[in-house]
Structures are given as C-alpha cells and as structure tokens.
Amino acid sequence: MNETKLVIIGLIALVIAAISLWILDEPEILVDKEIEITIALGVGLLILILDRRADRRIHEMIHEQHLLINKIHKMIDEQNELIKNMQKISSSHNSKES
C-alpha cells in the first residue's frame, strides 16, 4: 500500500506543477513534458492497482485449491485404511480356512 500512496502523492504533485506552469504561462515544452510524466504515472498507478487485484484473486484461488487438495487427501487416506482393513479381514479368513 505504501507504493500506491507514493505514486498518488507524486501524481498530485505533478498535476499541481502542471497547473501552476499552465497558469504562469511557461513555455509549452515544459507543460508538455509535465503532462507526459503525469500520464505515465497515472498509467503506472493503474497497472499497480490491477496487478494487486489480480494477485489477490490468484491467492484466493490457490487457497481454495489447497483446501480441496486437503479434502481429497483425507478421502484417499480413509480409502487406504478401508483397503488395509479389508486385506486384514481377508487374510484372517484365509488363515482360519487353512
């Protein structure tokens, strides 16, 4: 979040500088450069925000998949225990018959 605040403060400072240069009627080349920098920072801020949202969504998907994998693992363990118990019962019946 600190990066976002820093970019917003920089963007506000550049907008203020661009407006003050426009009011003071400075040469056009300075105003153009300030506007280009302001636009570049605005696009950078947009990319930063979208990246954080995407990262958060990916983290949620990974967490959901982790929970699902844990459930599947528990089911496999239960089935494995059932198979072992069935093998024990089967081997005990075979030994009684002999």
Image (cartoon, rainbow, N blue to C red):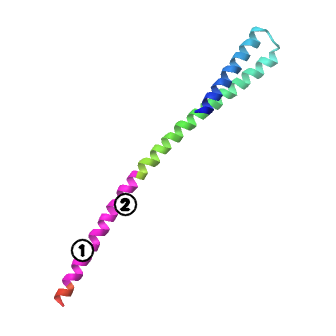
* Amino acid at circle 1: Met
Task: Please name the residue shown 42% across and 51% down the image.
Answer: 65
Q: Is residue 92 left or right of residue 43?
A: left
Instruction: Decide: few, some or many residues near mark 1? Use Cα within 10 Å; few <14, some 14-19, many ≥20.
Output: few
Which circle marks residue 47 in the picture?
A: none
Residue denoted by label 1: 86
Residue 35 location, x and y as percent? 72, 21
Span shown in magenta: 67-93
Residue denoted by label 2: 73
Give the answer, above or below, for where 22 lies relative to 35. above
Residue 32 location, x and y as percent? 77, 20
Name the chief secondary structure element in magenta.
Answer: helix
In the rendered structure, which disc, 1 or 2, sits on the residue that comes first in sequence? 2
Task: Report if residue 90 lies within the magenta region.
Answer: yes
Give the answer, above or below, for where 33 lies relative to 48. above
Q: Which quadrant holds the N terminus?
A: top right
